[in-house]
């Protein structure tokens, strides 16, 4: 799989992030969030686009839909991971990295907290709307509340007798 390695302008990257968010919405993904990482030190991309899916089938459908639509839009095939487990599929378009989460995985990993200094955008009526400081703080505060750890992730925090 060859990813498009040509660096886009910031406007092109933002437009592609919006495009990916629209594809997610068309596939009925939930909690769609676009993170502008251009001001974040050490960011691996200019934009992250995240969504939650209710099932592994939906994770596959959303991921495949974005990959297909991106190819048709001339973005080529991204580098990708997570297709087998269908819990967190990453599609790396270089400037834009798409994260398609099963809702349990999104709740567990909470990557929004890692990039809390980014600007957050939501998809409203087919366009991106920037969260103001209060909205963003409320969103991040919600992430710090007690989380339910799904059974499939409980082993990650546990150690065997040897401490490994």
Image (cartoon, rainbow, N blue to C red):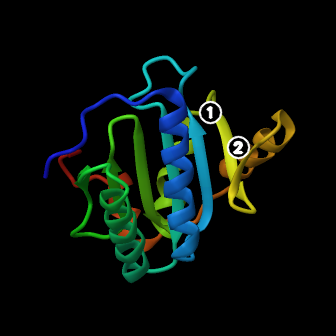
Q: Position of residue 57 (x, y in %)?
A: 37, 82
Q: Secondary structure at mark 2?
A: helix
Q: Position of residue 37 (x, y in %)?
A: 54, 29
Q: CA distance from mark 2 to mark 1?
A: 8 Å
Density class for disc 1 (Cα within 10 Å; few <14, some 14-19, many ≥20) is some
Compared across the picture, whether 4 is left or right of 37 comes to left
Q: Tell me: residue 68, above or below residue 21.
A: below
Q: Position of residue 58 (x, y in %)?
A: 43, 79
Q: Secondary structure at mark 1?
A: loop
Q: Tell me: residue 25, above or below residue 161.
A: below
Compared across the picture, whether 77 is left or right of 48 comes to left
Name which residue lies at 23% across and 45% down.
163
Q: Which residue is mark 2?
A: 140
Q: Position of residue 30 (x, y in %)?
A: 60, 69
Q: Which residue is mark 1?
A: 116
Name which residue lies at 58% across and 20% down.
39
Q: Mark 2 touching mark 1, by CB under 8 A?
A: yes
Residue farthest right in this picture: 134
In the image, which disc is placed on residue 34?
none
Query: 141 or 5: which is nearer to us?
Result: 5
Name which residue lies at 24% across and 66% down.
83
Q: Tell me: residue 95, above or below residue 153.
A: above
Query: 107 or 39: which is nearer to us?
Result: 39
Residue farthest top in this picture: 41
Which quadrant holds residue 140?
top right
Density class for disc 2 (Cα within 10 Å; few <14, some 14-19, many ≥20) is some
Name which residue lies at 17% across and 47% down.
162
Q: Tell me: residue 39, above or below residue 112.
A: above
Residue farthest left in this picture: 1
């Amino acid at each position: 799989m060859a990813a498009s390695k040509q660096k886009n302008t910031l406007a092109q990257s933002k437009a592609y992030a919006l495009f990916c968010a629209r594809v997610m919405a068309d596939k009925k993904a939930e909690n769609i969030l676009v993170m502008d990482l251009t001001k974040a030190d050490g960011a691996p991309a200019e934009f992250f686009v995240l969504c939650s899916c209710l099932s592994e089938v939906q994770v596959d459908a959303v991921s495949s839909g974005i990959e297909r639509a991106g190819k048709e839009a001339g973005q080529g095939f991204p580098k990708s991971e997570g297709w087998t487990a269908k819990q967190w599929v990453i599609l790396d378009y270089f400037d834009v990295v798409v994260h398609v989460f099963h809702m349990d995985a999104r709740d567990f990993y909470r990557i929004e907290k890692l990039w809390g200094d980014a600007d957050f955008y939501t998809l409203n009526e087919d366009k991106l709307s920037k969260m103001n400081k209060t909205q963003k703080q409320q969103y991040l505060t919600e992430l710090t509340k007690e989380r339910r750890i799904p059974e499939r992730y409980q082993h990650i925090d546990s150690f065997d007798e040897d401490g490994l």
